[in-house]
Image: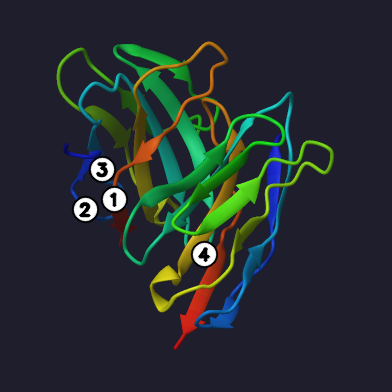
Amino acid sequence: NAGVMQNPRHLVRRRGQEARLRCSPMKGHSHVYWYRQLPEEGLKFMVYLQKENIIDESGMPKERFSAEFPKEGPSILRIQQVVRGDSAAYFCASSRYRDATGKNEQFFGPGTRLTVL
Amino acid sequence: GDSVTQMEGPVTLSEEAFLTINCTYTATGYPSLFWYVQYPGEGLQLLLKATKADDKGSNKGFEATYRKETTSFHLEKGSVQVSDSAVYFCAPGADKLIFGTGTRLQVFP
């Protein structure tokens, strides 16, 4: 069974460019989560999506960041006009479902390491 | 808001030593509790979990017990190996996992 896949693994962008990060969840998983890990810090929740819906985007910066999870294809985290402070590792996780209490196990991808020059 | 506090690292141990990594949390309601491990250059792997009070999660010799009264979920292992060297994250949560800064473990032969 393939795990959560993310690409690219490493991405270099210059200030002002756009970054697109892709995440393919595990087979049979319809819930996707994005987290950001700044250097020497823990992961911070960004957004939770189901197919074609954003469930919780409370961790997303108000500007320049957007996420989608279309009916077909991977989830995309898009960062417009990147700045140096966006340099971080971005991790995607997926889960199969939401159980009755809203608790579910998340499986993480290997991450995309974004460097903004 | 919800938060988690882990003991600061690095934790440096000799092989076969006993390991404890403390974790306490504040959360609304009764979240599930998870320990994740991150090896260098990799993503997070679920190590163990507990979903209700007094549950004990265990895997690969690691254990942690969900203590509701002390809001803690300390990670323990009786005899660590060099291959256990990694960063360990305690994470309470439901849909949204709350991560601490992690605890780096270094095990020397």
Could you tell me how many numbered marks the image carries?
Answer: 4
Q: Do tag 1 and tag 2 residues touch (Cβ < 8 Å)?
A: yes
Alpha-carbon span between mark 4 and mark 2: 19 Å
A25 vs A19, nearest the viewer: A25
Q: Which residue is mark 3?
A: A19
Disc ID at residue A40: 4
Q: What type is the residue that disc 4 sits on?
A: Glu
Q: Where on the picture, by quarter, is residue A7?
A: top left
Q: Mark 3, chain letter? A: A
Alpha-carbon span between mark 1 and mark 4: 17 Å
Q: Mark 4, chain letter? A: A
Q: What type is the residue that disc 3 sits on?
A: Ala
Q: Mark 2, chain letter? A: A
A14 vs A5, nearest the viewer: A5
- Ranked by sequence position, the earlier of labels 1 and 2 is 2
Q: Do tag 4 and tag 2 residues touch (Cβ < 8 Å)?
A: no
Q: What type is the residue that disc 2 sits on?
A: Arg
Is there one chain holding both mark 1 and mark 4? yes
Q: Do tag 4 and tag 3 residues touch (Cβ < 8 Å)?
A: no
Disc ID at residue A110: 1
- Ranked by sequence position, the earlier of labels 3 and 2 is 2
Q: Residue furthest right?
A: B69
Alpha-carbon span between mark 1 and mark 2: 8 Å
Q: Secondary structure at mark 3?
A: strand
Q: Where on the picture, by quarter, is residue A5?
A: top left
Q: Which residue is mark 2?
A: A9
Q: Do tag 1 and tag 3 residues touch (Cβ < 8 Å)?
A: no
